[in-house]
Amino acid sequence: MATHFTRRSLIRGITAATAVASLATGLAACGGNSDAATSTDSAAKTGEVVIGKVSNGAARQTSIKVSEVKSISAELPAALKKSGKLEIGIGALPAGFPPLAYVGSDQKTLTGAEPDFGRLVAAVLGLQPEVKNSTWENLFVGIDSGKVDVAFSNVTDTEERKKKYEFASYRQDNLAFVVPKKSTWNFDGNYENLAGKTVSVSSGTNQEKILLEWKAKLAKKGKKLTVKYFQDSNSVYLALSSGKINAYLGPNPGIAYHNRQVANTPNATRTAGTYSGAGAGLQGLIAATAKKDSGLAKPLADAINHLIKNGQYAEWLKAYNLSNEAVAKSEVNPPGLPLDNS
């Protein structure tokens, strides 16, 4: 989950609801038990996808022309092609995680970089995108049960997940530590700097697995790292501002977004270091996630590579200020977070 990039300015007039949602960025990237309403788009029919619609300033609204590529849609499993729909899973309940996935300024549209990219891919495949929002845990339940065909939800490619899922990569995955702006602590890429610190992380994420691995290594050296969990982003940032925790480890896109939103407030925060979501020695990747042996990874990757080749991918990234997370190509099941750390 996350990346080394700086985000340009985001709109000033963000609503209170979206401001609260912005704090959830790190929490969902990588939980509850209900689904939000499905939203249906007409991109497959119109040949145009509107990026950043009702995004409340998290993106510059951009219309991108994209049409079905018959040679790619022909690769789809017969049942999916016959249905004419691509059920896209997003795990953004309860609060969302701007700029990646959240409810827009109209208080009903699921917007953000992830659902928008799913809509672009669906258009290349000639399918009607139907976006379904759920909690992080239910996102995977939806894939397992066939309720959704593919997840575009900041899912990290890991070797553990490959036991059940297949992947088509589309964005770099980097993590970040967020601390109060006044804090002098920095990660500096060295887990030993976490000794004596109290850090929050979201349960069930790859960043949790990495943090717990560091905790175990420190314990072997007689040093302590305390890991704390909170139910929602508000609780995380309240704990951070009150000094109950020293840092929070989450996806970099959301943390960079959050830093901008609170920059001129008493609770200003800053990034205290970044780290690959795949651990040391391997660049982490975010990937479209489908059920293993579904036959979807190849057409998904081909659709993504079509978008890369023809410039729509770059337009999408630019609209959300995520250009520094670009990948040169989409790969089917590329190396991911290793089993010994996933």
Image (spheres, rainbow, N blue to C red):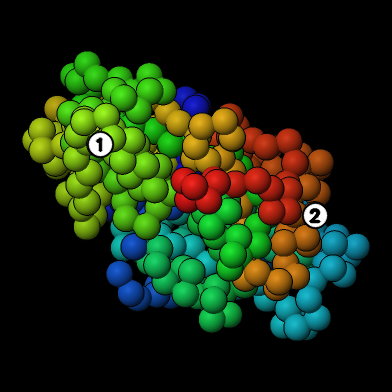
- 168 on left or right of 152: right
Relative to 98, is 112 on the left or the right?
A: right
Specify whether residue 20 is in view: no
Q: Look at discs 2 and 1 and give the one toward the viewer.
A: 1
Q: Which residue is mark 1?
A: 219
Q: Position of residue 304 (x, y in %)?
A: 73, 51
Give the percent coordinates (x, y) of residue 259.
32, 31
State the residue at coordinates (35%, 28%).
191
Q: Which mark is residue 302?
A: 2
The picture places residue 257, in percent across and down from the top left corner, at 38, 36
Considering every residue shown, the one lying at the far top of the view is: 184
Determine the secondary structure under disc 1. Answer: helix
137 or 218: nearer the eye?
218
Residue type, label 1: Ala
How far is the residue under mark 2 from the one under mark 1? 45 Å
Choose top left, top right, bottom left or bottom right for residue 265.
Answer: top left
At x 75% / y 70%, what residue is drawn? 295
Q: Nearer the viewer, residue 51 or 164?
A: 164
